[in-house]
Image (spheres, rainbow, N blue to C red):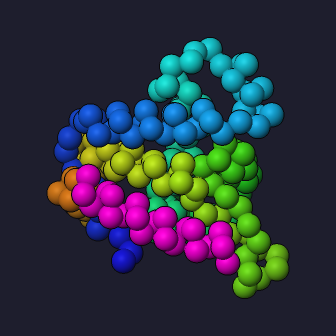
């Protein structure tokens, strides 16, 4: 079952569920160690979970890449370039690399084309769905959006955590299958 961002995003502040998701994400992220993560940790100003999370996905482009993977099914470099926000190829390359390095995405060879890569959400990346949903819900409530652009936020708010769990289960199947294939 595919949920498009156009079907899914409404008005609520961050709730306890979102805080729990961030805490869960942080606990899982802290167990993911490699040299770049250790050196990044040495440069951080704070060990606050919010700060550490924002170090990983807190810029505009990273969240839009994750959004496009979750709600638009985008998986290839060229697909991300076609997003309405107009990311440049050099910024896209840098952000995809950072998200892979931090364990939010996985990059693998596309079996249908030797020169293409396919990006998949990792379990850590899929755990961001409630966060992305809450950002969309907040934006719908507080910013001048159109009915069309806010329809996904409205659906996400109506469906709430039950819908989010269902969507996460679908993403796990879809992205796990890509990792095995």
Above or below 20: residue 178? below
* Rendered residue at 29%/40% (across/down): 17
| Position in image of residue 77 (x %, y %) | 67, 66
Instruction: Report which quarter residue 42 is drawn in.
Output: top right
Tell me the quarter of the picture where residue 88 sits.
bottom right
Q: In this view, does 35 lie above or below 8?
A: above
Name the residue located 69 percent from the left edge and 51 percent from the top edge.
Answer: 100
In this image, 177 relative to 102: left or right? left
Q: Which sits in the foreground, 88 or 26?
A: 26
Q: Does the magenta stretch include residue 81?
A: no
Q: Nearer the viewer, residue 103 or 62?
A: 103
* Rendered-image quadrant of the C terminus: bottom right
Q: Is residue 175 above or below residue 104?
A: below
* Residue 59 appears in view: no
Q: Which residue is drawn at 22% across and 53% down?
A: 160
* Number of disc labels: 0
Counting from the top left corner in percent of width and height, residue 155 is at 23, 61
Where in the figure is residue 135, as x and y percent of width and height? 35, 43
Identify the residue at image location x=55%, y=68%: 175
Q: Magenta span covers which residues?
A: 161-181
Quarter occupied by residue 18: top left
């Amino acid at each position: 079952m595919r949920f498009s961002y156009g079907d899914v995003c409404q008005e609520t502040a961050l709730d306890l569920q979102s805080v729990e998701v961030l805490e869960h994400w942080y606990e899982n992220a802290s167990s993911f160690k490699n040299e770049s993560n250790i050196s990044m940790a040495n440069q951080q100003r704070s060990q606050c979970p919010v700060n550490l999370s924002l170090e990983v996905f807190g810029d505009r482009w990273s969240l839009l890449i994750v959004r496009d993977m979750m709600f638009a099914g985008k998986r290839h470099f060229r697909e991300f370039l076609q997003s309405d926000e107009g990311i440049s190829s050099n910024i896209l390359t840098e952000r995809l690399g950072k998200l892979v390095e931090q364990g939010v995405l996985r990059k693998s060879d596309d079996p249908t084309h030797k020169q293409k890569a396919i990006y998949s959400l990792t379990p850590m990346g899929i755990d961001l769905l409630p966060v992305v949903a809450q950002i969309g819900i907040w934006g719908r409530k507080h910013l001048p959006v159109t009915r069309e652009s806010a329809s996904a936020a409205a659906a996400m708010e109506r469906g709430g955590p039950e819908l989010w769990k269902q969507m996460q289960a679908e993403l796990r199947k879809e992205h796990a299958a890509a990792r095995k294939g």
